[in-house]
Amino acid sequence: MDIKKRTHIVVPRELVDEIDKLSGKRKRSWFITQTLKREIRRLNFIDAVKETAGAWKDEDHPELRKGVSSWVKNLREEDEKRLKEII
């Protein structure tokens, strides 16, 4: 079950008016909750990108030296050869 907690926040009146216009007064909490969830996911994603920056080393993946499209093309050609051998 989703446990809820009531909280008090102070928001500029113009912002509340915009929220109410978009969601309706009866769905204000839902709107704010969805918006906060989306922003938290975005900020967590940015943190993860920053933490992993530089983790990919080109020297660890020589098969991609000519580009991903070339690598994929080679994989597909190898698959075609194997398929012809089987048939």
Image: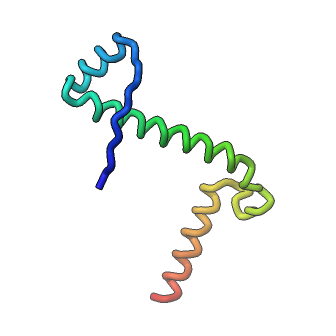
Q: Position of residue 2 (x, y in %)?
A: 31, 51
Residue in the picture at 35% in, 36% down: 33
Q: Is residue 50 above or below residue 73?
A: above
Residue at the extreme bottom of the image, as rendered: 86
Q: Position of residue 37 (x, y in %)?
A: 41, 40
The residue nearer to you, when weighing 29 against 84, is 29
Residue in the picture at 38% in, 27% down: 8
Residue at the extreme right of the image, as rendered: 59
Query: Residue 76 is drawn in which quadrant?
Result: bottom right
The residue nearer to you, when weighing 63 against 55, is 55
Residue in the picture at 73% in, 54% down: 55
Q: Is residue 45 above or below residue 85?
A: above
The mark tally for this picture is 0
Q: Position of residue 83 (x, y in %)?
A: 49, 81
Is residue 7 left or right of 1 when viewed as pictured? right
Instruction: Point out the image quarter for the C terminus.
Output: bottom left
Query: Residue 36 is drawn in which quadrant?
Result: top left
Instruction: Point out the image quarter for the N terminus.
Output: bottom left
Q: How is the image coloured?
A: rainbow
Is residue 72 left or right of 11 when viewed as pictured? right
Q: Is residue 48 above or below residue 80?
A: above
Q: Position of residue 39 (x, y in %)?
A: 46, 35
Residue in the picture at 21% in, 23% down: 25
Is residue 22 left or right of 53 when viewed as pictured? left
Q: Is residue 72 above or below residue 40?
A: below
The residue nearer to you, when weighing 34 against 45, is 34
Residue at the extreme top of the image, as rendered: 14
